[in-house]
Amino acid sequence: MLRALPFPAALVDDSGHVIETNRWLDTPNGDPLVDLSGEQLEPEQGLALGIGNESRWRVRPLDDDASVLLATAEREDTGDHLMRRFFSSGDSLFVVYDQFGRIIQSNSAWENLLGYDHTTIFGIDSWTLLPPEDLVTRKRVEEELRADGRSEPTFQMRAADGSYRLVQWALHFDTSVGRCFGIGRDVTEEDRLAGELHHRAFHDELTGLANRARFLEELERCVATGTQPAVLFCDLDHFKVVNDSLGHHTGDLLLAAIGRRLGSLSSSVDILVARLGGDEFVVLLGNGTAERATKAARRIFTSMSQPVLIDGHPIHAGMSIGIAVSQTSSQTDAEGLLGRADTAAYQAKRLGRNRYEVFDDAMQATVDRRFNVEEGLHTALRDHGLEVHYQPVVALPGKGIVGIEALVRWRKPNGELVGPGGFLDVAEDAGLMPRLGAFVAAEALEVGAQLGRRGRPMTVSLNVSAGELSAGSEYVTQMFDMVSAVGIEPGNVLLEITELAVVSVETVRPTLQALRNAGLRVGLDDFGTGYSSLSHLRELPIDVVKVDRSYVMDLVSDPVTRAVTGSLLDLCSALDLEVILEGIETTDHASAVEQLGGKLAQGFLFHRPMPKDELLALVGGVRDLETSSLDGSVSTAVAPSN
Ligand code: C2E
Ligand code: MG
Ligand code: MG
């Protein structure tokens, strides 16, 4: 056994007399090169002895009563560091097999680790300790030992209790003695830790999906091997609202649930789903034509169409998906492709959310504009570049003006007037809505106050963004203070929310209730679009419903729309809700609305949105008609303008 060790070693008795040495210590005349006699040999203790007193020696008992010791030199040049580590540390495993793989000797570290008694393990075929399926390791190790007498495998070994430990071995087969010597190290924990670190490095903790690093690695691999990948960039719609109104914990639960849904879609091996961070997910198709990518997008929408239940609350999670396909893209490096998918997702958001867009070059130009818009808005907010226009609300059939809706406009430095469709989404994304909303409210309430002073008090409608509403009581206080400051009756202020802001009835309700408690009125805008739900009419504390323009458009031509709108008006009346019909453009629209019993309307037929001065001239100029105001009280109104 000794001869096979690839470093100086000697067997000595407990008084230090050398019994046997190996070839490292042999001298030509046969005298051992080491004499440890007379030394106090404490097992495990290093001794400054031996060859020219240069080496440290370490002695270990080979048998129970320590009558035979193995002394090994710790010279720097003694070869394999694993061997030295074994002898210097009590944790190293040591085992000797015969040429058939039967265990002849094992040390206590080996026995302790695997839980075998050396008497029972003696003569056992060591290969039987490997997992039955691990035939590859055995074959490889035997081949290597046969070829050059060495092998350094790492394999699982079955312990006495049935569990497995992962052991890294340095095996040396000495043909002269027909023995295989092995020094091993238990790397089970190390391996688990390494696995965990690897998992953490490449996985997103919240969702368990791959993370950005893993995604980019895979995308780069696809690009490099020319598989022509496609990327779907999936951005949750209105996630910020969920986070702000329902809290981060709920936000996290929602992300985890979405992650699970997306993850379950990756049925094919060449699909990788990852979370890049925040509310951004990506799907990588290893080989993706535009058709395959759009099909995947449609599958995602189908899976997202069911609300996610968080703590019993259903949350509708919309998604805007951007697709970039390397096949049709001039820029095919990984970052470039991801950037293009991101751009397409941004475009999908701009075009109304909850949809997908495939990247093309024209899109880039659109996206570049976004940055200009955002910059322009910052300037506008600072330099009074925003204007508020007002569209009257009229009572039917007299068409007298009973209210005004404030609609924001952006006057660009070049004089161009941009409507909200051209910048509100950018403002929302950039977190500018609270500032913008406060500006519009201040202007509009001032106009409302002026009308009041002219003897024409009327309802002032303000559109409230989801971002503002999610501020909750802060927003309520701010609104109430502003209304009180200008001296308008709170009941003459209508706050229009869209259903997009209603992430969950439970969370919006307290805010809406608080607004109403403060005397302000609340309206549900654009009803009939998005996630319209009749239950919202019953469940939300609201006073007014604004029926979307799309209903009015079809009223004349489509009997079904007429019937639905009629029922809606009946329901609202039963629920004591006022209804305003939006987007009356023709006299046919107006008469259809009147026939259905609609009482309040808004539309280009009556008045387009107009600047403040025009409005004041229109409303404040004449005082000769009586009409009912939005809240039912009687006030003086102007003659209809058309
Ligand atoms: P909205 O609140 O539903 O406002 C009605 C929109 O329909 C206005 O568009 C108005 O000009 C338009 N409209 C009115 N009558 C007709 C008609 O007969 N035919 C047609 N085709 N359109 C008509 P605008 O001003 O472009 O505003 C669009 C949306 O932007 C608003 O929809 C509102 O949701 C939002 N918005 C406008 N101002 C603000 C604001 O200050 N804050 C917030 N948060 N949102 C605003
Ligand atoms: Mg509105
Ligand atoms: Mg509307």
Image (cartoon, helix red, strand yellow):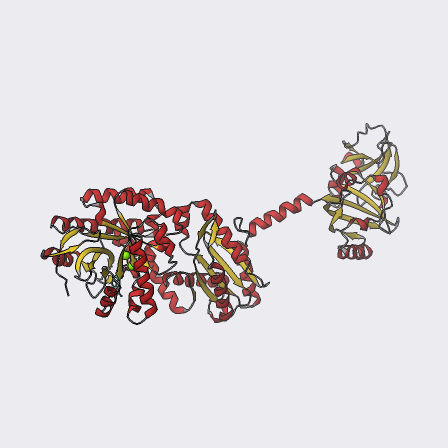
Nearest the viewer among 158 and 468 is: 468
Measuring from the top left, give residue 518's x and y in whole percent. Answer: 27, 42
Instruction: Please tell me whether residue 597 is drawn above or below residue 207 in the rendered image.
Output: below
Query: Which residue of the protein is positioned furthest toward the right in this rendering?
Result: 29
Residue 430 visible in the current orientation: no
Measuring from the top left, give residue 573's x and y in whole percent. Answer: 29, 55
Instruction: Please tell me whether residue 328 is drawn above or below residue 509 in the rendered image.
Output: below
Nearest the viewer among 527 and 250 is: 527
Measuring from the top left, give residue 427's x and y in whole percent. Answer: 32, 55
Q: In the figure, is residue 200 to the left or right of 439?
A: right
Q: Report the residue at 18% width, 49% height from top.
A: 446
Nearest the viewer among 326 and 430 is: 430
Q: In the figure, is residue 239 to the left or right of 36?
A: left
Residue 487 visible in the current orientation: yes
Measuring from the top left, give residue 161's x and y in whole percent. Answer: 76, 42
Q: Quadrant of the N terminus?
A: top right
Q: Report the residue at 22% width, 47% height from top.
A: 491
Q: In the figure, is residue 623 to the left or right of 414?
A: left
Q: Quadrant of the C terminus?
A: bottom left
Nearest the viewer among 277 and 503 is: 503
Q: In the figure, is residue 206 to the left or right of 46?
A: left
For ligand 2, give the image quadrant.
bottom left
